[in-house]
Image (cartoon, grey):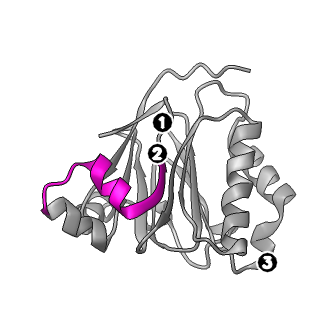
Amino acid sequence: MEKNITFTSGIRAITCKQFSNEFMRLAPKSSVDYPWTLAESVKGTSAYTRGVADCTVCGITDGKDVLLMHICPTMKSNHNVSQLRQFIANKIDLKKDDLQGILVGSKLSKLSQNIYNMFAEFLENYNIPFSELKIANDKVNVGYLGNKDEWVISSLKMDKLLNKNYESKKVFSDTFSKVCVSSEDEIV
């Protein structure tokens, strides 16, 4: 089934200070916080999370609202595929044509890859196009700004690259081991 995407989400590298400025004015319930299970996930017009290392962040948007999940691989309950599917199906209409996703994070460990792959398979099974920023070399922050339909990513290493005036594309390629941008998204 072909999706009919009517918008293009931007993906931008920003400094940690810019990240804080963008999200500190949002309500606290816009933040996906520890212990990073499905229960802490956020659905709204904008959402964010911090400190992504071996965890996986999955965001699904229709260009207006976002469902943002930050899932820790060290918790056994987070590896339940049917629970993950049911949770997402209860939060968003999977029959919508204009859904897009993003996956950020993970490490090479088996547990971390398991979470990442569960999300990737879910998105593929529901024909939701998604971009990937996989395995960063430091902890990253991830947010979605609904008013701009834009994913923003920051980290301390990215700060150094941005201070050298590198563009987002170069920042991402120097920070993540895999950068794969969906044809429905663009790095800005």
Q: Which residues are magenta?
A: 164-179
Residue 17 shows in the view: no
Q: Tell which circle, 1 or 3, labels the residue nearer the N-terminal end.
A: 1
Residue 176 belongs to magenta span = yes
What's under tag 2, amino acid-wise? Thr
Residue sitting nearer the eye, 24 or 137: 137
* Mark 1 Cα shell of 10 Å, populated few (<14), some (14-19), many (≥20): some
Image side of residue 4 versus residue 49, left or right: right
Residue sitting nearer the eye, 126 or 43: 126
Q: Are marks 2 and 1 in contact (CB under 8 Å)?
A: yes
Q: Residue furthest left?
A: 164
Residue labelled with disc 1: 64
- Residue at 29% x, 71% y is 157
Q: Nearer the viewer, mark 3 or mark 2?
A: 3
Expressed as whole percent of the image width and height from the top left, the position of residue 53 reads 51, 74
Kindly identify which numbered label has been placed on residue 76.
3
Q: Secondary structure at mark 2?
A: loop
Residue 33 shows in the view: yes
Q: Secondary structure at mark 1?
A: loop
Image side of residue 123 versus residue 156, left or right: right
Residue labelled with disc 2: 45
Q: Quadrant of residue 50?
A: bottom left
